[in-house]
Amino acid sequence: MNQLTKYILCFLFISISGYSQIVDDRYITEPNPERFFPELNDINKVKYVKTTHYLSDKKGKFLRPTGTAPSFFVNEFPYRYIYTLNPYNTQDTLSKFVYKYYKSEGTLEYAELHDYSSNKSTYLYYDKDKTIKKKEFFWNNELVSTTNWIYNKRRDFKQLIRVSIISQDIQKREYRSFYHYLYNNDNQLIEKITITNDEITEIRKWEYIGGIAYEIGRVEKCLNYTPLEYFNEEYKYTYDKHKNWIKKIGIGSEANTTTEREIIYK
């Protein structure tokens, strides 16, 4: 019996399922910091956007802030900035994103996030083809973890084959995590293997029928399940002449959640 089989036999949870799913895109694209950008048409024409959130009554009268901090988006290509502001004193900056783009290609070169309240910083580095290659996380100006993405060049695209994460705690103890990705001849993800501190902790397998991914095998050493709550909410929008929304109202049973955006164009 080989070592891999011994590991698998020791796992505490085994499940074989046949439900339909789409393979999680985050295996390939995360982290994509542009998901924090405001939803905008013709973003290159935008100079800045200020976004605020509050609760209102049924007549639209302001009640109180929602607790969600306002944000400020500044477009100064090749740099773009997103500031998170103090809800009660907008002169204070709680956090800041900085994005820098390759001028020639217009694709993201690097991004950095600074959380001033906890003195944490994250740096993300990208290749010119938009693929993430490295992430560094600092706390109190000390490197805490490094993540590297490794690709296999296949014709005109990259295929993610490995992600490695090296981190340490406050006692300087090191932790290692590795994610390996295997593909079929059609370049579809069929297996993901997770190794933590030199021990296999998860194996997931998929097969494809009619272009749809089905999870056919899953082996885990331990299973942590957190249920998700979904809230159905109806939204009403007000748009400007550029077809960007400047007001979004979520209709609730007792109060409405309102988000307003002040958009200044170049």
Image (cartoon, rainbow, N blue to C red):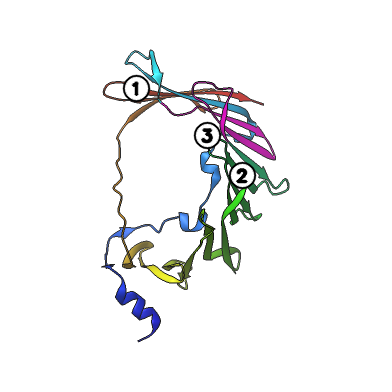
> Quadrant of residue 158 in the image?
bottom right
Does 43 appear above or below 24? Answer: above
Q: Is residue 227 left or right of residue 158?
A: left
Does 81 appear above or below 52? Answer: below
Q: Residue at x 27, y 64 (%)?
A: 18
| Callout in the foreground (3, 2) | 2
Q: Which element type, helix, strand or loop, lies under badge 2?
A: strand
Q: Which mark is residue 38?
A: 3
Quadrant position of the N terminus in the picture: bottom left
Label 3 to label 2: alpha-carbon separation: 17 Å
Q: Which residue is mark 1?
A: 256
Q: Are marks 3 and 2 in contact (CB under 8 Å)?
A: no
Q: Residue at x 28, y 60 (%)?
A: 19
Q: Are marks 2 and 1 in contact (CB under 8 Å)?
A: no
Q: How many marks?
A: 3
Residue 78 part of the magenta-drawn span: yes
Does 84 appear above or below 13? Answer: above
Label 3 to label 1: alpha-carbon separation: 21 Å
Q: Which residues are magenta?
A: 67-95
| Three-letter code, disc 2 | Glu
| Three-letter code, disc 1 | Asn
Q: Which residue is mark 2?
A: 112
User: Could you classify mark 3 by the number of other residues whose Cα lies within 10 Å: few (under 14), some (14-19), or many (20 or more)?
Assistant: some
Query: Residue 132: x percent and y percent?
Result: 58, 55
Q: Is residue 226 left or right of residue 211?
A: left
Q: Is residue 185 left or right of residue 109?
A: left
Query: Residue 191: x percent and y percent?
Result: 41, 69
State the residue in front, 196 or 32. Answer: 196
| Three-letter code, disc 3 | Pro
